[in-house]
Structures are given as structure tokens and as C-alpha cells.
Image (cartoon, rainbow, N blue to C red):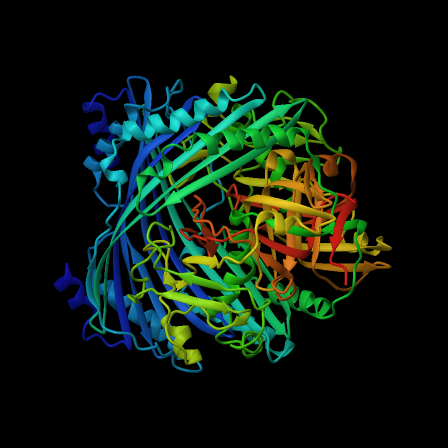
Amino acid sequence: MKAFLTSLVRGKPADYLEIRLEETETTRVEFQGKRLENIGESLSYGGNIRALVGGGWGFVSFNSLEGLEEKVELAIRQARVAAALASEPVRLAPVPVVEDVVRVKPILSPREVALERKKNLIEGYARLMLDYAPEITSASVRYFDRFTRLYFANSEGTYIEQEKLDMGCNVAATATANGLSQSAHTGFGSSNDFSFIVGKEKEVEEVCRSAVGLLRAEPITGGQYPVILDPHLAGVFIHEAFGHLSEADGLYEDENMRRVMTLGTRFGQDFLNVYDSGLDEGARGFLAYDDEGVRTQKTYLIKDGILVGRLHSRETAAKMGEAPTGNARAISYQFPPIVRMRNTCIEPGPASFEDLLRGIKLGVYAKGSYGGQTNGEMFTFTAGEAYMIRDGQLAEMVRDVTLTGNVFHTLKNIDLIGRDFTIFDSAGGCGKGGQMPLPVSHWAPHVRIQNVVIGGKK
Amino acid sequence: MMEEIIQLARERGCEEAEVFVEKHQATVVEYGNNRLKKLETAHSLFLALRVKKGGRLGFSTSTKPNDVQGLVERALRAAEFGRLADFSFAPPAELPAVEGFDPETAALPVEELVARGGRVVDGLRDLHPALQISSRLALISTEIEVKTSQGLSAAYRRTGYSHSAGGKLVEGQNFLYVGDGRHSARGEDVTSALIAEVRWAFERARVNVPVSSGRYPVILTPRATAAVLAPVLASLNGQAVERRVSPFLGKKGQALFDPRISLEDDPFWPWGAGTRPMDDEGIPARRKALIDKGVLQNFLLDLASARALGEEPNSSARRSAGVVTPGPSNLIMEPGPKSYQEMLAAVPQGLLIDVLMGAWAGNPYGGWVNGNVMLGYKIEDGQVVGRIKDTMFSVNAFSALKDQVVEVSRERKWVDAAGPGSLGGGLYLPYLWLDGVSISARQG
């Protein structure tokens, strides 16, 4: 493979050329109630060629390995068309030429677990949910595992063979009573151990308890509140509220954005520390090399409340005169790599849960996540479960809690950080530029934020 | 190859087999930050196999050409445990003629796409020196073929064209994004219309105006209408009805909405973004009313959900990563009598909502649509006076479409169905005026 791929990208009339081949085997098991809705194994096979000429990129993706020479020529031809209209050449930040083979070393590989055992496990959870309470009318458990073999070669001499493993399981319960229908869900994920899905009875029952509880909960009254986020939601929050803003492709060619994101700018109080890392084994955001063949690292974004770093591809790093960070990622061979997160974390602080509650007269405790979205400046995310806080005590459950904020105000409004840094992976993924879902992680402790806007009836 | 797969499945003891093949050829031109960035070409092949063995369903997909053996083996493994399939794959059928493939569109040269994107950049450049202009053009030719052991052998081609244009302006810590897009089976040049829309939005959104929390009359643009319709669409999905999570279960024939709300799925709409002569299970296209004058008429049904509900499948199967789920081809909402301009002029004090962020998150069957107003405006005495920010929009779609409808516009637009929570297909929707919408704003 090495000789074949290397020969395709060497000595061609392009400033830079790379080829990526990928073979991915996916297993899915999905139960809807007691019924096995979907079980199957799939094979995804294909590759792409990316060419840089002058200031333009050409990109060709394919399933068939026939005629690869012509595909290389097509990518170069396209890059030339783009280059003819380019105002300035694109440079790529230099990175070490690498030859490496990366094998996954799972604790328990899903490939060593029979399909029947996976089915039985998932079925067990679905049955557990249906038996939990008469109000539970629907239970959905969706499991997947994915094993990928990647081959990467570029015109600079880098050649990498890399294996990747990704697993996830989503659990959702719907409770119904008196024409009202409420759902609760959770998810689990891992990149190195099938056991992530074993022994989750307690968590699954918790989802049922939440769904049934929501039947009696009232929608929250919209307004501005102090909010405590649990570690899951705090992770989603930092991903949406700050992680995306740190992706350099959103700012490298925009002078005004670069001013906003000048290193050294204060973003939070001096106890706020945020980083993004590819080094955390077991996290779904674990990554040895990114899709440009760059070694990943732990990259601090905010240190002591001050902006200290950002996430780069080779192109954005060169343009900004900074070092590549190994954040160029593609969800599959059908897409070129773009700047993405890996495992984005808030470092723990000193507070206990009681410390966080103390002093809140009227507030909200928000747990778990239904997902979120950002435009860089404003963000929103929806809690899976939420409770009012009254006079420093947890009070009644409320539903339909969607929080919104403005990055530049909200990060500064974090006034207390918990000491319970939690390692947790969900089964969801991140979407950007039509590429979704990308496996990412976000680990965090409990976090308290003042003045958060929550939507809802007045 | 498809015949070969069915043949092999039969030899291995399957009672039935169904093969779905989708071939794409796509060209994408991308302008970003005021310049041409990238040209892309994609050739893709997608194979999906479903088999019935011992009455159980097995499923597998592949993108590897000639992966006949592997595909069948994997489907057989799955069939050992698969759900009991009490339905049969599609029988032979005549496909109706639809206007969904345009040879001229398929043959559009890449230079033409590059030129159109360039005109967007040139047409917006004078708005502001720091405006970051982007434009994306995609041209897709698709061939879809379904064969079943029941004797169906059906195929069609379609073209897809999409063009989006937008701009981003960062001034201090104020971010402004404006943009719009068009989607059709035909590659007509819509550059001028896109430029006009982006200019209109940019000029009105340059000024931020304060808004306080409260209840407001709100005009939704077609894409905001799509966000509010999402819980309705999710609940019309036959699979959700079958799983008993849809609140519409058992409510056929009931008036659930305002009589001005009518929704139908029309796969025949000429050059619609989702026009097709059959669904992804090979059932010939059928037009069906979903909501007629507020009354629930039909669910969107694939083979499995139709069987479970004791109804006929109505050509609503879509495949996402090969897995079949019901969804519309072209979801068409009935227009109203007034023009959008007339509606706007009639609002003394209210909001115009264009883009909602994060509104897809949450439990759709409860009906709540809560989104950050990423792009929205204040209306005073019928005039758009500026942009509102840092606010949450909240409605319950089920009650709002029943009790809060003021007016539905005459104009409609094709809305991009892509994005999280999307059911795929095309959406052709009007502007919608709702009364008493809850807005929560940041104080201070």
C-alpha cells in the first residue's frame, strides 16, 4: 500500500498533494421497545485526493480505486481553476515528515464480541425500561461500533496507517399520561472498551425516572437565572460556547475576528481553564494523527481566564503564524479535513455541590443535554432534565429548558467551578460544514453561571 | 450486479431480497472569505441490501463496488436476529413521469458555477469592507435503482442544484451572519435574487435594537416556519405513530390545527427539491394530504409502519445511511391570500424571525420549539427597524398552529431540509404570522 500511495502523490505538478483511503466497518443494533428495529453490519470503503496549487484547493472523492492517476490529475486541474482566481497563495505550516503505523489497543474490542451478545445487552436495557413503570410507552436503545483503517500519504513524504475505534449507545424513554408525552435520554461512548455499555442498569433506570418525572413537571417560566450545569451539560456548554470560536478557520482570514480573538484577551475569571486534547485514551475525541497527518496534542485555549491558544489546521496555522495543533479532521473520505475539536475540557475548581447551591435565591439546576448550537457569538443548548433552585435548595422539576447566552458575557459570568471533573462520553457527535456526526468528547466538572437567559412562557 | 445479489441471497435461503443502489456525481464550488477556495468532485456508490430469511429481516450496506458476497453474508448474519418482517418488499410497478431530471442542469459546466459564485462576491463586496462573503454551489446527478425478488425493477435519475450566498461581519463583539439559499431540481441562475436577499437582510440587520421579554406578534420567514413545523412533521412520521410516541396517534379526522393550515406531500411538484417517481422502497409516487384545513388526514408511511398500522404504504420511504424511515418528498404548505409585504405592513409592533438556532433540540413530540434568534428583526408600524439579539423564541407548535395563527402568506419558498433533525426532501413553505409568541431577552 505504501509504495502504491506514495507513487501517486510524488513528483506531480502541485504545491501539495495528499491521498487518503479508508475502510470502515460499522455494526448497528437498535431496539424499539421489545422489537429489534434494526441490526446490521455495513462496510464503507473509499478515498480522496486533495491538491493544492497556488491559492486553490482541488478535492476528488471516490469509491473505486480504478483510474487513480486520472483522479489525481482531476484534483490538480480543479486546484488550478481555483488558483486562477485566488488573490494570494496558500501556505501550509511545516510539520515533521512522519512514517508511522498506529494500531488500536482496546481493553475489550467490540470486534471480539459476538453480534448476539451485543443484541442481548441492548435488548436487556430496552426490556428494563418498558418494565420500569406503566407510563413508559416507548423505549429506544441504539448502539453502534465502528472500526476504521486509514491510509494517508502526502507529497512531503509522510505515510501513516492508522486504525480508529468508535463506539456509542443512545438510550431514550418516552413516558405518556393524559395525552402528554415526555422524553428523557442519555448516551454512552468510548474509543477503547466495549465494557462502556455493560452494567448500565442504573443509568438506564435514571432515564426512565426522569421521563416519568417530566410528566408532572411544568414548563419553565422564561427569564434570566443563575444556573448550575452538571458536568455533561457543562461539557456541551464549553464545546458550543467557546470550542467552536477557537477553531481558527472561522477567523484566520477575518481581521476583525482576529482582533476579537487576540491571544492575551481576558475571556473568563482567573480560575477558568479550558483545553482541547487528542491525547485522552478512551475518549471518543482521542486521536493519534489528524487527517493531515499531524500529531495531536493537548492545546490550552484559556489559562487563568486568558486566551492562550486556538485550534489549527496547517493552512490556518501558517496564515496566523502559529503552530499546527492536529485539529484538521474529516468525518469520512467523502470530505476534506476542516478544523474541528477533539476532547474539549473545563479544568476542575474548588467548589463542592453545596458551595454551588449556596446563595442562589431563585435559579436552575440543568442536567444532561439534548444538544446545542452556536454562531460564534451566541449559543444555545437544551437540558435533558432540570430543577428549580429555591433559597439554596434543589426544588421542583421543570421541563423544556433551553438556555442561551452570549460567549463574551457568559464565560465571564462563570463564578464558581466544581471539583468533580467527570470523565464521560456521550453517543452524539459534532456537526460543522455539512460534516456530521464527528466523534468528540467534552469532560468537565459542575459549573455555576450567573444571568443565563432561558426561553419559555412568560 | 443487483441481479447477482438477489440471486445469491435466494441461493442462501432467503425468501425475499431487496437491493437499493444510489449513484451520485457531484460538483461543488466553494467561495469563502471573498475568494474561490475549493472545487470538489465526488463519485459515490451506495448499496443497501435487505433480506427476509426465516421471516426475519436482515440488513447490510456497502460502498465497495462489487462487494456482492460481503453484502449478502452480513445481511444473513443480521437476519439471524432481525425483526420479524410481516411485510413484503415492493412488487413490480409502473413509475409515473415526473419532472425531476434536467439534462441541461446535469451538463452545466463547472466554469458556469465558478462564474455564478464570483458574481455573488462581486454583488455583495460594496456592502462593507470587512464583510466576509461566502457562496456555495452544488450540482448533483443521482441515479437510483431498486430491485426486489418480488419482480420490481425500477430506476430513475434526478438532478439537484443548490446555491447559497451569505456574509459575515464582525464588529467588536457583534457578529452578524446573513445568508440565503435556493434548492431545485433545475440549475436556473438565481444569483441576482440571492444577492438581493442578502443585501436586504444586511442593510436591516446592521443596527441592533433593544427588545424586552414579553409576548409578541411574530412573522416567521419560510425557514423559521420550517423550524416551527418540525414537531408536526416528526409526529406525522408513521414510525413515530407505530412506536406510540406521536401525539397524533388515533387522531385521524380530527381538527388539530387552524383551518388555514394545510400540508401535503407532493412528489410530483415540477422541479421540486424532492421530486421523485418512487420512494426509496420502490413504491410509486403518491400525492397525499397530511393536514387538510387543520384536519389530520394521513401519516407518512413506509412498508413496515404501514403494515403495523394496518394501512397501505404511501410512498414515503427515505433512506438515511441505508436505514429506511418515513419522510416527505416535497412537503408543500398551502398559501394564504395576503402578500408578505401586506402582512408586514399590518404589524404595528412585533418581530420578524428568520433564523432560529438550536430550535431542533429537545423532544419534538411535546411540541416545544425553543431557539436563540440568530437572525431576527423588530417591526414598528409595519417597518423593519433593526436587528434583535440575545433573545430566545419559544412556542409550542401544536397550540400555536391551532390558536395563534393570524395570517399565512401568498409567497412561498423552497427551504433547505438539511441539518440536524431533518427528515430530508424539499420543503415549500410560506411566511407565517403567529400571535402571542413568548420572547425571553437578556437584561442589561
Name the foreground residue: B307 vs A416: A416
Direction left: furthest residue: A3
Residue A289, compared with residue A33, is above or below; it is: below
B191 sits to left or right of B335: left
Residue sitting at 52 percent across and 49 percent down?
A231
* Location of residue A5 in the rendering, given as x and y in whole percent from the top left corner: 18, 63
Residue B299, compared with residue A316, is above or below; it is: above
Name the foreground residue: A272 vs B143: A272
* Location of residue B119 in the rendering, given as x and y in whole percent from the top left corner: 54, 72
The image quadrant of residue A350 is bottom right
Residue sitting at 52 percent across and 32 percent down?
A206
Name the foreground residue: B303 vs B277: B303
* Location of residue A178 in the rendering, given as x and y in whole percent from the top left corner: 68, 22
Viewport quadrant of the C terminus of chain B: bottom right
Residue sitting at 57 percent across and 35 percent down?
B234
The answer to whether residue B217 of the structure is visible from this angle is yes
Viewport quadrant of the N terminus of chain B: top left
A212 sits to left or right of B350: left
Residue A233, compared with residue A328, is above or below; it is: above
Name the foreground residue: A397 vs B422: A397
